Image (cartoon, rainbow, N blue to C red):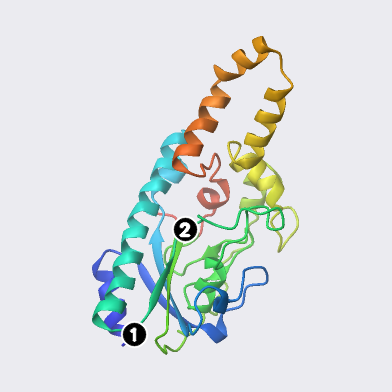
Amino acid sequence: MKQKIKDFALGMGVDDVGFASVSDYNSPRSPQIDSIMPGAKSIIVLAYRELSTCESPNMRIAMNGRMDVMEFSKSCSYKLARFIEKELNRKAMTVGVSYPMAMEQETGGAVGELSLRHAAVAAGLGVIGRHNLVIHPELGTRVIFTAVICDLELASDPPVTAELCIDCDICVEACPAGALDEEGFTNVNKCLGRSQPWGIGGSIRFWSKFVDGTPEQQKQMFIDPHYWRLYQAQLIGFQYNCFNCMSSCPVGQKK
C-alpha cells in the first residue's frame, strides 16, 4: 500500500514521500491530530525542493519562487488525497504549507494546525538542524513539506539517524534578526519582524499610526510604498522578505 501511494506521489513530480504513524508524531505546540481528523492513523508527508530563487537578492523574485512551489504543492496534496479517497476508499485530509493557520493572540499566528517539521522527521524525511529547519538527506535545507492525514494504517518509515547538520553556524551568522542566537530555539518575534514586515505586525503598526495622523499625514501614508506592500500582502498571503537561514545552509546545495 505504501509503495502504491509513493509511486503515485512521485509520479506527480513530488521529490520525496515519507510515512508516519500518528502515534510517532509529536509536536509540542500544535493541536492533537484528533482535533483535525478523528480516527486519523497516518500522516503522509510530501517533500518539495525549494528553487534556487531563494538565493535571489530581489525578494520579490525569491518570494515568487516560494509561491510557485506552494502552488504546485497544493495541487499534489489534493490529488493524493483524492487518490486515497477515490481509489483506496479511505478518508483523507490535506495540510498545506504555512497557511491558513490559527491567527490568535495565544499562538501569535506562528503555530500550524499540524507541524510539518515534526511530521517530516517522524516520517523519516530528515532531522532538525541548528537553524531549526528540517535537513533532508538529499535536498538539504532547501525543502518544504505538505501532508495528507488519512485513516489508513501505515507504519512509520525508519527515522534518519545521520547527523546531517555540520554545525557550521553559518545560518546563525546569516540571520539579520538574531533569531537563531539561542541554540534549539527560534525567536519567532525577531524572525517575523524581519522576514514578514508586511504581516499582521506591520499592518497593526501602520493602522495604529494612521488613526492618529492628520489628514495630510494619512494621505502621505497611502502613497507610501509600505502601504502598497501591505495591500499586496493582504491579497496574496504572507510574503517573506528573508530566506537567509535556508539559502545560506551549505548542506544539500547544488554545486
**Quarter holding the N terminus?**
bottom left
52 and 12: which is toward the camera: 12
Tell me the SS state at disc 1. Answer: helix
Relative image position of residue 93 (x, y in whole percent): 41, 72
Type of amino acid under label 2: Val
Dot 1, crowdedness within 10 Å: few (<14), some or many (≥20)? some
Q: Is residue 105 depicted above or below 154 in this figure?
A: above
Residue highlighted by disc 1: 2
Q: Can residue 109 be seen from the camera position used here?
A: yes
171 and 186: which is toward the camera: 186
Relative image position of residue 64 (x, y in whole percent): 40, 41
Q: Residue at x 54, y 39 (%)?
A: 241
Q: Residue at x 62, y 73 (%)?
A: 27
Q: Can residue 255 be seen from the camera position used here?
A: no
Q: Is residue 192 depicted above or below 111 in this figure?
A: above
Q: Is residue 14 left or right of residue 44?
A: left
Q: CA distance from mark 2 to mark 1?
A: 23 Å
Relative image position of residue 151 (x, y in whole percent): 42, 84
Q: Is residue 84 depicted above or below 74 in this figure?
A: below
Dot 2, crowdedness within 10 Å: few (<14), some or many (≥20)? some
111 and 164: which is toward the camera: 111
Tell me the SS state at disc 2. Answer: loop
- Among the two numbered marks 2 and 1 on one chain, the one whose residue lies closer to the N terminus: 1
Q: Residue furthest top?
A: 216
Residue highlighted by disc 2: 97
Q: Is residue 50 left or right of residue 191?
A: left
Q: Do tag 2 and tag 1 residues touch (Cβ < 8 Å)?
A: no
Q: Is residue 50 left or right of residue 7?
A: right
249 and 243: which is toward the camera: 243
Relative image position of residue 188 (x, y in whole percent): 68, 52
- What label does residue 125 carry, if any? none
